[in-house]
Image (cartoon, rainbow, N blue to C red):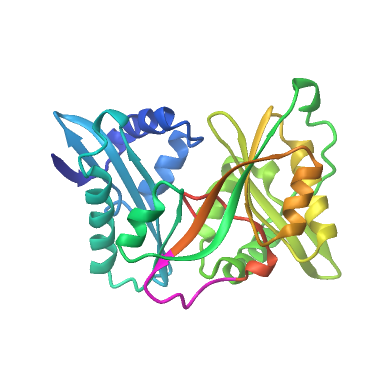
Amino acid sequence: MRLRAMTNADISAGLRLKEVAGWNQTAADWQRFLEASPEGCFVVELDGRVCGTVTTISFDNQFAWVGMVLVDPEYRGRGIGTKLLERAIEHLDNQTIPTIKLDATPQGKPLYEKLGFTSEYEIGRWILRRSPTGTTETSCTGLSKSSPRFLEKIFKTDREVFGADRSFLLQSLHDDAPDFTMRIWNDGILEGYTLGRRGSFADHIGPWVAVNARSARRLLEEFLACSSRETLLVDCLKSNTNACELLRSFGFSYSRPLTRMYRGPNHYPGRTDMLCAILGPEFG
């Protein structure tokens, strides 16, 4: 078993593993991980073949994120996932980052608990599947036309909501899908915003932030109008009952649970009262 840093040459192997797992990431997402943390993403090789991955991203050195914990089903049961997580934690500890966060599946949660992670709150994955006739972009109303000034406002508000600066990541999402960057502006106040990604099989809404139910609805309506995909994904906070009911009313169905977890002090929890949906379990 060889554990080493991930490189651009391993992106194709990462894509293979996420396809086996049925995940929605693209090569652009893997590139984001490597650009954000070129020394903090790792793979395990067996017999010269990449059979496991893990990624890390540090946000302001206030906390870091662990994601993309993938192990080839053929090689499970050999401790590969544990070794990858221990290496990711070691890397972040060596950088003296006080807090590590992740979003755990029910299957992974017991392992994370053994490694010192504590549950913070619950998240639900919701899926919308619609017919091709309902996927036109003709009804976009213009909430997606965000100028650099509005982007700066979004980035500033997001620092408060997320708990740290991740503007480098949001800028990358906006550059790839500017029509998914939406905002509601009222009397000089930003009342809500969304960004999104075009994944391998679905468009992904997130982050989705709103100060009230009216703004949350408008943003979701606009996103649904601007997306041309038959499948959409969103990771909604279980505690935000208004957002969950809104998703249900638009035809989304609940898919699976996730648990936001952290290791170390949680000094920067963000503003969950404003958060309808996270960016995604791999990014936070």
Give the residue displayed 32% in from the left and 47% down from the top: 54
Q: Main secondary structure of the magenta part?
A: loop
Q: Would residue 234 be found to the left or right of residue 98 on screen?
A: right
At 36% from the left and 61% from the top, the residue drawn is 113
Q: Is residue 267 magenta?
A: yes
Q: Which quadrant would residue 127 be assigned to in this image?
A: top right
Q: Is residue 144 visible?
A: no
Q: Residue at x 47, y 78 (%)?
A: 267
Quadrant of the rendering where the N terminus is positioned: top left
Q: Is residue 63 above or below residue 241?
A: below
What residue span does the magenta drawing correspond to? 262-270
Residue 50 against residue 112 in the figure, above or below: above
Residue 43 against residue 237 in the figure, above or below: above
Q: Can you see residue 238?
A: yes
Count of numbered tags: 0
25 on left or right of 51: right
